[in-house]
Image (cartoon, rainbow, N blue to C red):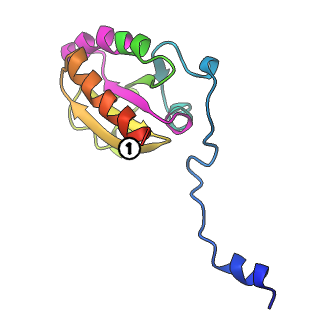
Amino acid sequence: MDSMIFFGLFKRKQKVRGSNRRSLSANEWPDHVITLEGKNFNDFIEKYPLSMVDFWAPWCAPCKAMIPRVRRLSKIYNGKVAFGKLDTQKNQDIAKQYKIMGIPHLVFFRYGGKITSITGVKSIGDIKNVIENLLEKKDR
C-alpha cells in the first residue's frame, strides 16, 4: 500500500465551522452594530475571530439602557470585535438555541463557537474587561 494513501486514511477531519479563517482587512469589519436575524445570524458569528451578540427585546427597559453602551463599544473595538444585536421577540428560535433565559444577554463568539456570555445591564468597563480578556486569549 502506498504510504501517502495509508497516511491519508488516518488524517483527522477538519471542522467545517471556521474553515474560512483568514485575516480580515479593516474594511471587512463592521463599524457599527449589525442588526441580526435568522438569515444573517450564522454568517455573522462564523465570520469573525471575535464577535458579540446583544440578545434583546423592544419591550425590555434594561435592554434599551444597553443600546448606547454596545454602540460605544463597537466604536472602541472597531477592527477587533464585531458587534450585532438580535431581537429575541422576532427570533425566538435562535434565542432558544442559545438558551437565552434573561435579557439583556451578551454572547461572545469565536468563529461561530460560543465562548462566554453575560446577562443583565453591565457598564462599559465591565464589558471591556470581558473583551480584553478574550482578545488576550486570542493573541496567545
Decide whether residue 48 is among the magenta residues: yes
Q: According to the image, label 1 marks what residue?
A: 114
Residue 101 in which image quadrant: top left
Locate the C terminus by quadrant.
top left
In terms of image quadrants, where is residue 135?
top left
Q: In the rendered picture of this protein, how many numbered marks are placed on residues?
A: 1
**74 relative to 135, above or below:** above
Front-lying residue, 126 or 63: 126
Among all residues in the image, which is located at the extreme right?
2
Q: Which residues are magenta?
A: 45-71
Going 60% across and 66% down the picture, which residue do you hit? 13
Relative to 64, is 129 above or below? below
Q: 76 and 89: which one is in front? A: 76
The quarter of the picture where the N terminus appears is: bottom right
Magenta highlight on residue 100? no
For the point 21% across and 22% down, the residue is 126
